[in-house]
Amino acid sequence: MQLNGSEIIIECLKEQGVDTVFGYPGGTILNVYDELYKHSGEIKHILTSHEQGASHAADGYARATGKVGVCMATSGPGATNLVTGIATAYMDSVPLVAITANVAVPLLGKDSFQEIDIAGVTTPITKYSFIVKNIEALAPTIRRAFQIAQTGRPGPVLVDITKDVTAAVTEYERQEIAPVKRSTDKIKEEDIDTAVAMISAAKKPMVFVGGGAVISGASEELKKFVDLLDAPVTDSLMGKGSFDGEDARYVGMLGMHGTKAANYSVTECDLLVTIGARFSDRVTGNTKKFAYNAKIVQFDVDAAEINKNIMVNASVIGDVKEILSRVNAKLEKQNHAEWVKKVQALAADKPLTYHKDVLTGPYVMEKLYEITKGDAIITTEVGQHQMWAAQFYKYRAPRTLITSGGLGTMGYGLGASLGAKTAHPEKTVVNIAGDGCLRMNMNEIATAVRYQIPVIEIVMNNSVLGMVRQWQTLFYGKRYSNTVLNDGVDFVKLAQAMGAEAFRITKCEEVEEVLKKAIALNKPVLIDCVIDSDDKVFPMVAPGAAIEEAFSEEDMK
């Protein structure tokens, strides 16, 4: 049948099973938005307050579901406002398709109004960037974009479409989209056998889990593997929830703000089995001193991650769910009871601690976990509050912590919470923010109110840029250059002005009641938690230090 470009875009989205799009209209994309209007009963569009909010919402939707998130924007500044969200998705391997419109083909390259080469801009931060200048190429390009976004190591794809293509007419024929196959073609049995032999020979093995285990849906295989191996487990920020945070073998997060038990155990172990993790600098600390007593086996879908940051002794390339399944089939039950007991004793001896006599971020997170029983989706911004959310809320299932890991994007969490709640309306969704981050994206509270998306925004309000101040305190002689935010902004009044419910907490005794009330309201809610400006995240590994040199507040005394 004959359809115009805008109709083809919508039909291709329907082919892919897209039910929600986040975006912001403008001149060059008007044809597409006109078609969206006609299909509003099939594809829900959420108008965010800013294009960056749309990209973060699509990202949050993707992380919460495993499906491809979709966002849209017009040309020029609309498109460039997506860039931070696209980069965030790229760094954390999130399947995203960003659809932008551009000026008509005759106007390209002439500095036309709101013209920008967005495909060129985003090339370094996407798996692929397309510009469609021919109507016949439109449907195949959109289909290919979705395939690329989901295949192998997921990531964002940009499709830029000129305005004349959105109006041109061509023949369209619906296609049934085949499910994306797991990446198994590079899994070699000899690599599996090598890994199994090394695992079987280990006396003090440790399992390190990253975001790849979440992406591949490998939780069941991971649990079986850990039971067979009988080893302690640590994770990265992105890996949280892939292994049950309440399991007795779990010893906490690894790295700069990881637990001492995790950092010491990785340093002492004789084998580190790394599953879907890329050895970020935030995890390894000084790479020359990372796991220096251990042999390292790495399971990863991306061959480019092998020997990139840390040299390994063996590797298996492919989807980690499939790798673990094959390893489990060949691995005999191991017994490392003495080693596990030693690590558990270390964890008990060096637990995470905080001041319990005043209101703190850790106290709020522990109360939130207690009240939600761990059955909530937590999104975060970036900073101290993010680390407290990682440390003190226990993630028992994958896709329940949604946070910007690789890029560390302040302003990410509120938009992401809108995407997560849209995907899972039955879940309690809470965004953990700092007051600095809230200033970057507070306009999305209005989006939550407009669509009555009942997310809860908890602001750890310390009137400073907390993590930067922590570094200034510890490493810059307490020179607080441009990190003090004592301008008297009242977040409760701001939230109320945008139509949300709002509360302020100043002491521990108020936390439980307010949290329960916020959940029960089932409306957009902001909770302003006033905490001390000098609260810090501990343990901490200093820049350039080995992870075994993690220090706490007690160590500083």
Image (cartoon, helix red, strand yellow):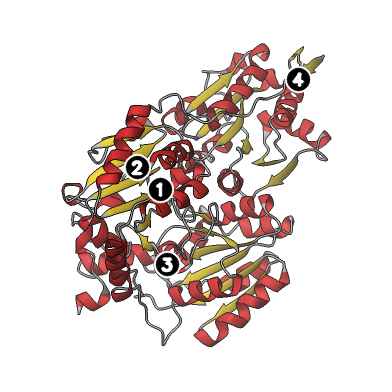
Quarter of the figure with the N terminus: top right
**CA separation in Å, label 3 and label 1:** 19 Å
- Residue 197 location, x and y as percent? 28, 39
Q: Which residue is mark 1?
A: 210
**CA separation in Å, label 1 and label 4:** 38 Å
Q: Which residue is mark 2?
A: 278
- Residue 47 location, x and y as percent? 69, 46
- Residue 130 location, x and y as percent? 54, 22
Which kind of residue does numbered mark 3 sit on? Answer: Trp
* Quarter of the figure with residue 451: bottom right
**Would you say residue 427 is visible in this rendering?**
yes
Dot in front, 1 or 4:
1
42 with respect to 347 (left or right): right
Q: Residue at x 46, y 77 (%)?
A: 363
Q: Earlier in the sequence, mark 3 or mark 1?
A: 1
Q: Are marks 2 and 1 in contact (CB under 8 Å)?
A: yes
Dot in front, 3 or 2:
2
Q: Is residue 156 above or below residue 254?
A: above
Q: Earlier in the sequence, mark 2 or mark 1?
A: 1
